[in-house]
Image (tube, rainbow, N blue to C red):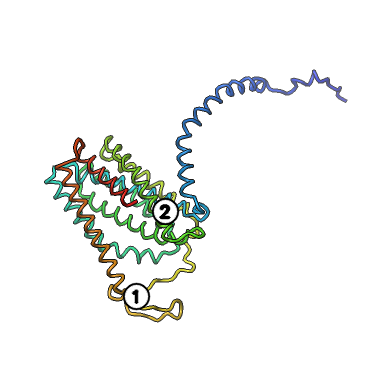
Amino acid sequence: MAAARTPQETTGLGEPEGLKGSSSRGSGSGRFGGPVRAVWRALRLPVTGTVRGIRRVTHAHGAGESGLGKLIELHAVNGAGDVMVTVALASTVFFSVPTDEARGRVALYLAITMAPFTVLAPVIGPLLDRLPHGRRAAMAAAMLARALLALIIAGAAASGSLELYPAALGVLVASKAYGVVRSAVVPRLLPPQFSLVKANSRVTLGGLLATGVAAPIGAGLHLIGSRWPLYGAFVIFVAGTFLSFSLPPKVDSAKGEDRALLTADEQPHGPLRKPTKRPGLRSVGTAVTHALAANAALRCLSGFLIFFLAFLLREHPLAGQSAAVSLGMVGVAAGAGNA
């Protein structure tokens, strides 16, 4: 039998020498760890505090539980990325050349991008209606496409290549596709006692606020280099790609949805619905056609005013301001009016 050891004999038994000094090293790390953690918390506080504040606003009144808050954040990311691309294109197409040349470049930009877009835009909605179970993937694809196109525009802007124009058209198409899917997603994420108008207003306001914050950041990045706003757009859209999949899975469900009939005559729903002739502008009724005409007139007037002010402020900027700053102030005023 082994002899019993006294407490004094067992005190240091089997204890490696490395462990004996660990306590002293631990006390040393604790001596420096406290200040390091305090500095890290101080540096992290502005970011985390801002994120918490935004999250409280976007998730208020049940929007967090229903998933609407995440859609508001996603739409804010979408608006920030779009304004970065807009700042880059404005500096490339409009401000980088004299006024006489800018008129021709703007006309070429509108002809190459907007003319095909007017044909493609009505087709996007029906195509996406055939994918009711892949809305998160469709929004992510629209974000990723714009991220890649931002890099293409950055290369084309540096080399002066005509690739800029079809890439800009692709950005418009992807942005329109995102908007169509977003409109279909909002009704699936309504909190209790929330109207559709109120939910859409919150989503739109979130995008406008993000646009107002991102615009001066894009202008600051442009001071570093003409391509930097596009690099910023790439990062933002990549973040939006991952954020799209954070939406609740229920947005991919088409349960309870039905196809809308573009006709002024009341039609029964479900299996009792009678087949009708192909709908068109003549079948929707005068109320819809009048609303379309009024909206088109407002869009034409606002578009004309934007370009009129853009060229006017290039020749006669506001007192003491450059043309770019003057046009930026007009943009801020327009954003405030939209909000």
As drawn, the label of residue 202 is: 2
Neighbourhood count class around disc 2 (C-alpha, 10 Å): few under 14, some 14–19, many 20 upward:
some
The outermost residue toward the right is 1
Mark closer to the observer (1, 2): 2
Q: Image quadrant of residue 292?
A: bottom left
Q: Which residue is found at the position 33% from the left and 50% from the top?
A: 146
Residue 223 in picture, x, y percent from top left: 27, 35
Q: Is residue 333 left or right of residue 201?
A: left
Q: Is residue 13 left or right of residue 173?
A: right
Judged from the image, the secondary structure of the residue bearing numbered disc 1 is loop
- Spatial distance from mark 1 to mark 2, Cα to Cα? 30 Å
Q: What residue did someone put label 1 on?
A: 263
Q: Is residue 98 left or right of residue 8?
A: left
Residue 41 in picture, x, y percent from top left: 51, 31
Q: Which residue is found at the position 46% from the left and 49% from the top?
A: 58
Q: Identity of the amino acid at label 1?
A: Thr
As drawn, the label of residue 147 is: none
Q: Identity of the amino acid at label 2?
A: Arg
Q: Are marks 1 and 2 in contact (CB under 8 Å)?
A: no
